[in-house]
Image: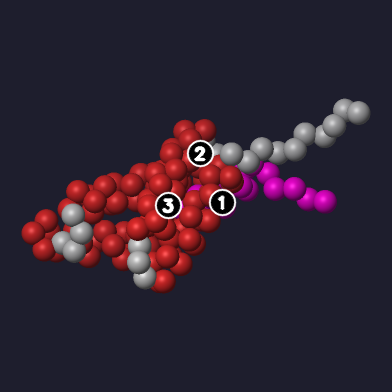
Amino acid sequence: MATMTRSTALKIAATLSVVVAIIGIAMFDLPNLTLGAQHSRDPFAIVLGSFASDILALVAAYGAWRTQKWGAVLLVGVNLFWLVQAIGSLLLDTTLGETVFASVMLVHHLVVITLCLWRERVASAV
């Protein structure tokens, strides 16, 4: 039976995180950044923090794709931050759509963290 290598796991984690970061930048960050602090739909500190975490995720994904330890560690950190946001959304959001989205993101972040911590199995000496 073929098992997944650490390199493959990190590449999958990097790809998943890039997709979420690009969607976040395109759908949330840029529209709110172009509105400016006065007209943004959300508090501007949250908009700036979201944009910063998305850029940090792209940097971390680059490192993880190249199987660098710092990239995997940074990707775990970013996804832990996103995990807290997803849990907060699950607790505070009111519409079904928001709850479903937060649930999908919760699963995504847990999968990425698991992939970043992936270790190859070592054959038993017994």
Res 76 label: none
Give the crowd class for mark 2: few <14, some 14-19, many >=20 residues within 10 Å. Answer: many
On the image, the x and y values in percent for residue 39 come to: 11, 63
Residue type highlighted by circle 1? Val
Name of the residue lying farthest toward the top: 125
Q: Residues within 10 Å of mark 3 (few under 14, many from 20)?
A: some
Q: Badge 1: few (under 14), some or many (20 or more) residues near its Cα, within 10 Å?
A: some
Measuring from the top left, give residue 1's x and y in whole percent.
82, 51
- Residue at left offset 75%, top offset 38%: 121
- Locate residue 78 relative to residue 115 in the image: left or right: left
Name the front one of labels 1 and 2.
Answer: 1
Check contact, mark 1 vs mark 2: CB within 8 A: no
- Residue ID for mark 3: 87
Left or right position of 71 against 40:
right
Label 2 secondary element:
helix
Q: Which region of the structure is painted magenta?
A: 1-17
Inspect the magenta stretch and tell me whether residue 8 lies in it: yes
Q: Gap between marks 1 and 2, in whole Å?
A: 13 Å
Q: Pick the residue in front: 45 or 97.
A: 97
Q: Is residue 10 magenta?
A: yes
The amino acid type, in three-letter code, at marker 3 is Ile
Q: Name the residue tied to disc 2.
A: 72
* Residue underneath mark 1: 111
In which quadrant of the rendered view does residue 40 lie? bottom left
- How far separated are the C-alphas under marks 3 and 2? 22 Å
In the image, taking residue 93 as reference, residue 2 lies left or right, namely: right
Residue drawn 44% across and 48% down? 83
What amino acid type is highlighted by mark number 2?
A: Ala
- For marks 1 and 3, the one nearer the N-term is 3
